[in-house]
Amino acid sequence: LPAGCRIIDFALRGDERGGLVALEEGKDVPFDIRRAYYIFGTLEGVSRGFHAHRHLQQIIMAVSGSCEILLDDGTQQVRVTLDRPDRGLTLPPMVWHEMHDFSPGCVLLVLADDHYDEADYIRNHDDFLALVEGAAG
Ligand code: T46
């Protein structure tokens, strides 16, 4: 995985009635949570993402269904399957990500360490590569 991307298996607190996962800031989620959003009802064949963030830290999980996420740090590309409601993937700044192959009914929950700010997005892949190369000197 690219540096800073980490798979986190959350504790399952379910019982004979069904599943339950609790996410606590600083414990299960390694940053302060300032925003949550969820992505659902994605139409068949649609892909999303196609950006990196300059500063934002996030954790993403498929609370229902599945999708593939492509991670690109400018050097390597890795695909990760998100298909467990008890497993999160941290998305650090400066990792290009694309979400593909959404299953019907897929719900992605994302927790972020800051409010929405369009200026934090790098939505052009060539700009992203130039910034990565610039940072590498
Ligand atoms: C990310 C991936 C995993 C808001 O107004 N507030 C928000 O908090 C968010 C997340 C989005 N928006 C608006 C901006 C766009 O007009 O909602 C619209 C759709 O957002 P976007 O095209 O960026 O959605 P995705 O699925 O491509 O990307 C999202 C997040 O934006 C992004 O931060 O890392 O999920």
Image (tube, rainbow, N blue to C red):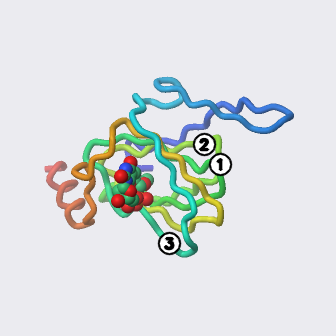
Q: Residues within 10 Å of mark 1 (few under 14, many from 20)?
A: some
Residue farthest to the bottom? Answer: 45
Task: Kindly tell me whether residue 119 is visible in this rendering.
Answer: yes
Question: In what element is the residue under mark 3?
Answer: loop
Badge 2 vs badge 1, beta-carbon distance below 8 Å:
yes
Number of the front mark, 3 or 2: 3
- For image coordinates 62% across by 30% down, the residue present is 22
71 lies above or below 37? below
As drawn, the label of residue 46 is 3
Residue farthest to the right? Answer: 16
Task: Kindly tell me whether residue 72 is visible in this rendering.
Answer: no
Residue 72 left/right relative to 59: left
Q: Distance between the residues labelled 2 and 1?
A: 5 Å
Q: Name the residue under label 2.
A: 87
129 lies above or below 17? below
Q: Mark 1 points at which residue?
A: 84
Number of the front mark, 3 or 1: 3
Question: In what element is the residue under mark 2?
Answer: strand
Question: In what element is the residue under mark 1?
Answer: loop
Q: In which quarter of the image is ligand 1?
A: bottom left
Q: How far apart are marks 3 and 2 (CA)?
A: 23 Å
